[in-house]
Image: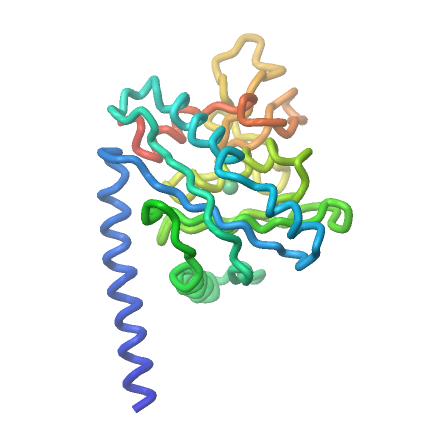
Amino acid sequence: MWRKLRIAILLLILATVVQQVWLDKVDLAWKRNFYVAVYPVNMDGSAKVGAYLRTLTAADFEPVAEYFAEEAAPYQLELRRPIEIQLGAPVSEAPPAPPTDKSVLSTIIWSLKFRFFAWANSPEVGVKPDIRMYLLYHDPATQFGLSHSTALSKGRIGRVNLFADTGYHKQNLVILAHELLHTLNATDKYDLTTTLPVYPDGYAEPGKNPLYPQDFAELMGGRIPQSETSAEIPKNLGQTLIGDMTAREIGWLR
Ligand SMILES: [Zn+2]
């Protein structure tokens, strides 16, 4: 009995996954905008982070929607605002962390677990979201660095590590925008060992002369190249651009 039930559940998950893959492909035609839900999570379980989360409003995330509207403008998508962001109620549980061993099997199992988590933890927002981003807030006073954020294009979900402090908010939005584009098939354009943007696709202005210092970061390149061996973290979305390769990956440039 339990065995049959388990098989039935697995088949149901598989069917959903297959359907989702198909939907994901269709969607990138940009005939309609994407609705994103952002769900804050108090990762420390502390009163301090909880108090910060209560200060968050939809207006805090509006700059991300405006940023994508501006960046999309040159591509004439026939959509004034390709991305809409909705702030959902905080979620009390954290989504499963990605596996440390990076084996294919454990990655697949994790991605299924994460998708199940998202299915079970999606407080209602105005419009049913196409993309769900879990914003994992940490107290900057007790945590030195942030661990890696991850987002999946299959299932369109992300877990984004952020600092729970107004002073970090603008940088948080850069991380959110970067992870958001991963859910729309954009790839990283930086060297994973050095974190330096990869030339030319990870550069906002690869044709700039002289090449250094660059004035902007390519959103998926992550940093503003200062020289061949150094790059700075952008302070806000205004210091970032979406380059041609990223635009092509997300379906803006054909
Ligand atoms: Zn990335």
Query: Image height check: is 99 above or below 12?
Result: above
Residue 82 locus on image (x, y percent)? 33, 31
Could you tell whether 247 is left or right of 16 in the image? right
Is residue 152 in sight in this rendering?
no
Q: Quadrant of residue 66?
A: top left
Could you tell whether 223 is left or right of 154 in the image? right
Q: Count all numbered tags in the image, as a single digit.
A: 0
Query: Image height check: is 249 above or below 71?
Result: below
Q: Residue at x 67, y 57 (%)?
A: 44
Q: Toward the viewer: 44 or 174?
A: 44
Residue 35 locus on image (x, y percent)? 35, 41
Can you say which quadrant of the picture contains the C terminus?
top left
Residue 6 locus on image (x, y percent)? 33, 81
Query: Image height check: is 96 above or below 193?
Result: below
Could you tell whether 35 is left or right of 139 in the image? left
Residue 156 locus on image (x, y percent)? 38, 49
Can you say which quadrant of the picture contains the N terminus?
bottom left
Q: Toward the viewer: 95 or 244?
A: 95
Q: Residue at x 33, y 39 (%)?
A: 34
Q: Identify the image's colour scheme: rainbow, by chain, secondary structure or one colour.
A: rainbow
